[in-house]
Image (cartoon, rainbow, N blue to C red):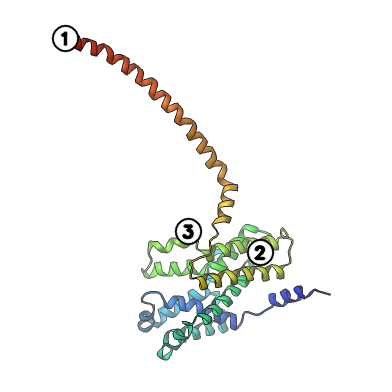
């Protein structure tokens, strides 16, 4: 007989994301899209372009994973139910009378609830990406990590590419590539963990790992929103890992520099001695002439 903990985590891992968690994901993504400068004006002047951008925000991770696996990138359009649901959320976000949806979403409890439910879908996307990649490349752990990360956090990269096509791209948008944001970091961490679990290198059941990782995501996200911080720093973990993997090179270069400094000072002093000795006869000749 399973323990209550196993029953809880197993029931949690079998929770369906449709429709409530998917609605929260679409709502948070489209509200972030609406906050972008000029997004409301584009929706009124060119609804088709706005709808296309909204679909990229909602399904960007799936599109990127399909591209990486050489699958049709428009395969997400085959899921008519989710497309209709996302389109409905897009319509009421941008065209609701008196902007009631935005006013309702402005309340912090609503934002916390929607953001927490969105983080739950992130776990499901990572697990789905890892499992889907394993069906193509059996135990190809590197591919599984990449596809899990793309499914969970690739939406920002796809939307940046869409801005590049439209001519709205700026150099600051490269932050997702060059300086990974906090969602990208935790998604990559989750993809690595679930890949190791899937390849039997991590001795923990899948449903327990899904529950613990989701609790971590939701807790950190709500903490960030309540404390109004842009990210929960991972600097201690990153510094420790950097010292373990690359710190020896920095220590070697520092020791090498410290050794070269005394030698350079010694050569400088020895080179100055002949100059000083050569200047003494010149002074003596100058004194004889003056006499």
Label 3, label 1: how many angstroms apart (C-alpha)? Answer: 72 Å
In screen coordinates, is 19 left or right of 259?
Answer: right
Badge 2 element:
helix
Q: Nearer the viewer, residue 130 or 205?
A: 205
**Residue 179 tag number:** 3
Name which of mark 3 and mark 2 comes first in the sequence.
3
In the image, what residue occupies the spot 54% across and 84% down?
A: 85
Residue underneath mark 2: 194
* Residue 77 appears in the picture as rendered: no
For residue 140, above or below residue 8: above
User: Residue 58 location in percent, x, y?
Assistant: 51, 76
- Mark 2 or 1: in front is 1
In screen coordinates, is 5 left or right of 277?
Answer: right
- The quadrant where residue 139 appears: bottom right
For residue 265, above or below residue 254: above
Q: Nearer the viewer, residue 87 or 226?
A: 226
Label 3, label 2: how many angstroms apart (C-alpha)? Answer: 23 Å
**Residue 142 tag number:** none
Name which of mark 3 and mark 1 comes first in the sequence.
3
Q: Nearer the viewer, residue 31 or 252?
A: 252
Mark 3 nearby-residue class (10 Å; few <14, some 14–19, many ≥20): few
């Amino acid at each position: 007989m399973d323990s209550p903990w196993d029953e809880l985590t197993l029931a949690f891992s079998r929770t369906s994301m449709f429709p409530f968690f998917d609605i929260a994901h679409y709502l948070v993504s489209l509200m972030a899209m609406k906050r972008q400068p000029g997004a409301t004006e584009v929706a009124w002047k060119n609804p088709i372009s706005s709808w296309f951008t909204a679909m990229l925000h909602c399904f960007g991770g799936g599109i990127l994973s399909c591209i990486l696996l050489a699958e049709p990138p428009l395969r997400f359009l085959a899921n008519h139910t989710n497309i209709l649901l996302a389109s409905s959320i897009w319509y009421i976000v941008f065209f609701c009378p008196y902007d009631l949806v935005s006013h309702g979403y402005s309340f912090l409890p609503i934002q916390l609830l929607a953001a927490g439910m969105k983080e739950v879908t992130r776990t499901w996307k990572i697990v789905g990406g890892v499992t889907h990649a394993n069906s193509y490349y059996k135990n190809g752990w590197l591919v599984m990590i990449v596809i899990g990360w793309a499914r969970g956090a690739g939406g920002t990269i796809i939307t940046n590419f869409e801005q590049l096509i439209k001519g709205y791209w700026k150099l600051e948008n490269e932050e997702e590539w060059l300086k990974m944001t906090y969602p990208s970091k935790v998604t990559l961490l989750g993809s690595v963990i679930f890949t190791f679990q899937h390849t039997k290198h991590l001795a923990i059941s899948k449903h327990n790992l899904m529950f613990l990782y989701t609790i971590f995501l939701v807790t950190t996200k709500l903490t960030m929103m309540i404390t109004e911080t842009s990210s929960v720093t991972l600097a201690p973990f990153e510094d420790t890992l950097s010292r373990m993997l690359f710190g020896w090179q920095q220590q070697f270069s520092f020791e090498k520099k410290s050794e070269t400094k005394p030698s350079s000072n010694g050569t400088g002093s020895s080179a100055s001695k002949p100059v000083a000795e050569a200047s003494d006869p010149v002074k003596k000749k100058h004194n004889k002439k003056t006499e």
